[in-house]
Amino acid sequence: MTVSVLEQLRRLRIVPLIVIDEPEQAGPLARALVAGGLPCAEIAFRTAGALEALRRLAGEHPDVLVGAGTVLTPDQAEAARGAGARFIVSPGLHPRVVDYCRSHNLPVFPGVSTPTEIGAALELGLTVLKFFPAEPLGGLPYLRAIAAPFPDVEFIPTGGINAANLPSYLAASGVVACGGSWMAPQAWIRAGEFDRIRHEVEQAVRLVPARPRES
């Protein structure tokens, strides 16, 4: 039976946010993520090499759940889909990106930060949203406040998530997974510190609670 992207995210609970410059580093990065116990990567479309890195990772490492992040336009979504992205993430709510993804059965998680944006996302047919930027906005107290009127909406908090606050976010009701770059920062990837990335991923995986505890 095919496992959906959302089901995989519910199991993994962490989405490594990856900013990568050189496509040839995609392979060593993928191996480090898998060895650390987290076969997942959201490749941010912030560098010239991002699309090719995504293509290589998706093509050469099918065991890794790979998506595209920082997707701002339908053209970027189309390019990501063609490169093998299995989900799309946007920093904000971009209706044309959502429409493209939904018309191609491609899971999309746009960023929201207000009740108005959550309501707009619901009107587009979405019920799992990126909460961004989580910590600068006020963290869990703010998320609880804006999520309260929307009991059927779930969130993927991103922005300021790290090893210290990850367990609290994952223990909160309505949180599917958390996104974060602390496990594989751009500088480590540039320097080829893949053993260090593997170790940091292992430590992050150990922090994942068995299930949400908050009522």
Image (cartoon, helix red, strand yellow):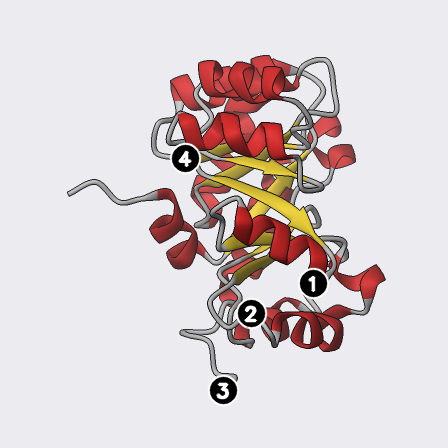
Residue at 52% x, 30% y is 99
Is 82 placed above or below 103 here? above
Helix, strand or loop under label 1: helix
Q: Which of labels 3 and 4 is toward the front?
A: 3
Helix, strand or loop under label 2: loop
Q: Which of labels 1 and 4 is toward the front?
A: 1
Residue at 71% x, 69% y is 164
Instruction: Tell me the tag on residue 67.
Output: none
Quadrant location, the N terminus: top left
**123 or 89, which is in the foreground?**
123
Instruction: Tell me the tag on residue 150.
Output: 2
Residue that mark 4 sits on: 64
From the viewer's perspective, tell me whether residue 76 is left or right of residue 27.
Answer: right
Mark 3 or 2, nearer chain start: 2
Residue at 75% x, 72% y is 142
Q: Amino acid at mark 4?
A: Val
| CA distance separating discs 1 and 4 | 33 Å
Residue count near mark 2 (Cα–Cα under 10 Å), binned few <14, some 14–19, many ≥20: some
Marker count (numbered)? 4
At which x and y percent is residue 90? Answer: 65, 37
Q: Quadrant of residue 65?
A: top left
Instruction: Tell me the tag on residue 215.
Output: 3
Mark 4 touches mark 2? (CB < 8 Å): no
Residue count near mark 4 (Cα–Cα under 10 Å), binned few <14, some 14–19, many ≥20: some
Residue at 77% x, 57% y is 160
Q: Residue furthest right?
A: 136
Mark 4 or 2, nearer chain start: 4
Residue count near mark 3 (Cα–Cα under 10 Å), binned few <14, some 14–19, many ≥20: few
Helix, strand or loop under label 4: loop
From the viewer's perspective, tell me whether residue 134 is left or right of residue 102.
Answer: right
